[in-house]
Image (cartoon, rainbow, N blue to C red):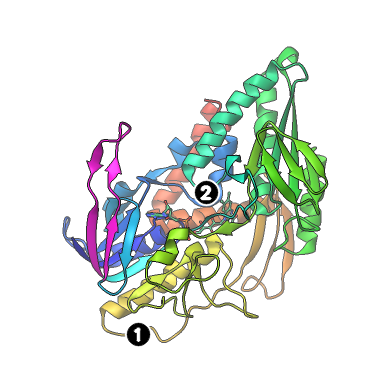
Amino acid sequence: MHYDIVIVGGGAGGLELASRLGRKLGGRRGKRRVLLIDRSSFHIWKPTLHEVAAGTLDVHQEGISYPILGRSNGFNFLLGELETFDPVAKRLTLKAITGEQGEVLAPERAISFTYGVLAIGSGSNLFGTPGAEQAHLLERTEDAEAFHARLLAAFTKASFSDDRILRVAIVGGGATGVELSAELIEAHRELMGSLGDEQRFRLDITVVEAAPRILGGLPQKIADKATLALERKGVAVKTGAKVLAVHADRLETSQGDIPADLIVWAAGIKAADGNTGYGLETNRGNQFVVNDRLETSASDVWALGDCAAAPWKDGKTIPARAQAAHQQASYLEKALLARLAQRRVEAPFVYRDFGSLVSLGDNKGVGALMGGLGGPNFFIEGLLAKWAYMSLHLDHHRAILGVGRTVTLALARLLQQRVSGRLKLH
Ligand SMILES: Cc1cc2nc3c(=O)[nH]c(=O)nc-3n(C[C@H](O)[C@H](O)[C@H](O)COP(=O)(O)OP(=O)(O)OC[C@H]3O[C@@H](n4cnc5c(N)ncnc54)[C@H](O)[C@@H]3O)c2cc1C
């Protein structure tokens, strides 16, 4: 199997790139020039995983099948997990796919390419904390679904327990931990609305952060507002508390033990260990080192999104954010089209930080917008911040579905929510 362009990873960055290139290059059905590979058969935008975990977003409504996206966007899709990648021979292999009984559904496959793009994202960084692997993660859709199933079971258990309290501990006070706690409060509130007094239970959430404040990467003002909003909702925010070990029923921290029925690890990200075995230069976080044109250490191989360490300002690399992956996808569309035409894109990639937004549930958000939208930073909160937050998701849908379908989808989801409610309890 040979393709002009092979993109591995159909997430926030890779899927947008495949869609953009597929629409431009197209090709006869069965003879397309762009191949997208992903280990999952359907796409969920990763920044919504905390909503899937809390049950405020239904994965079966939100997920879109890659083959369908490929058909409408002019790329081919291949299901599989990357096993080997040879940037010199321009060849990769995908692991065999096995069924539930271990039977082989698809054998190992080899694909050669003229131009290769790696967009395989990142996972969690457990920082070698003992027992951390037993905590819930939010790396993949399956993780979010598994947490949701445990949450529903924990809701039932708490309803009939002696103390009628459900304790959730979230490790990491970054955007993921903050947003997850807000979504859980919302899910709990919706559920309580349908239970009699004899079944109601209290939800105690503790967010544990080793740094002196939550939302370390964001301005102090946003962190202060978010802390206040969470505390008003009853969330305990413990800062300066380092997690020393994770046990089945508690977190052991530098400030004492925190009992917990459910523990979520949302602290730090790291790219896959396997990235170091693909013959490309990587950094300590296993990211592929790329230059300001997103080119890896091998010719005709690019990397984007969370798996790439791209130079930014003050010696830092571009942050692992959906907005960075989104901008890199549109840059690489031009770079790859130019390369196909035997030209080189002259301008390097420049990341434009439009600010950061954090969703706090209840149709509220908090954040700061900057650059391009009026010069200096300006602080926003409430419904305006929530709308700005949602516009990132709409932007992603627009890139993969086009304007018409994005509007139809948004309306369909709104109507669906009116019928079946916002919370998924099954
Ligand atoms: C809960 C949560 C909330 C977030 N909120 C925000 C936010 O509000 N704003 C923001 O800017 N960012 C947010 N982020 C970060 C954002 O999701 C990532 O920066 C972004 O998704 C990175 O895009 P990507 O394309 O690099 O990787 P991903 O979107 O993670 O996509 C990677 C893709 O590669 C596939 N893949 C991985 N390994 C392999 C393999 N070996 N073989 C084949 N396929 C593979 C995966 O299945 C996946 O489809 C959030 C992250 C989380 C977890």
- Quadrant containing the N terminus in the rendered view: bottom left
Residue for badge 1: 344
Q: Find disc 2 in the rendering and name its residue.
A: 139
Residue in the image at 48% along x and 71% along y:
282
Q: Is residue 341 above or below residue 8?
A: below
* Disc 2 Cβ-to-ligand 1 distance below 8 Å: yes
Q: Nearer the viewer, mark 2 or mark 1?
A: 2
Give the residue at x 29% y 64%.
6
**Cα–Cα gap, marks 2 and 1:** 35 Å
Q: Which residues are magenta?
A: 90-113
Out of 240 and 174, give the one closest to the viewer.
240
Q: Position of residue 98 (x, y in %)?
A: 29, 40
Q: Secondary structure at mark 1?
A: loop
Task: Determine which quarter of the picture holds residue 27.
Answer: bottom left
Residue 391 in magenta stretch: no
At mark 2, the secondary structure is: loop
Residue 152, placed above or below residue 175: above
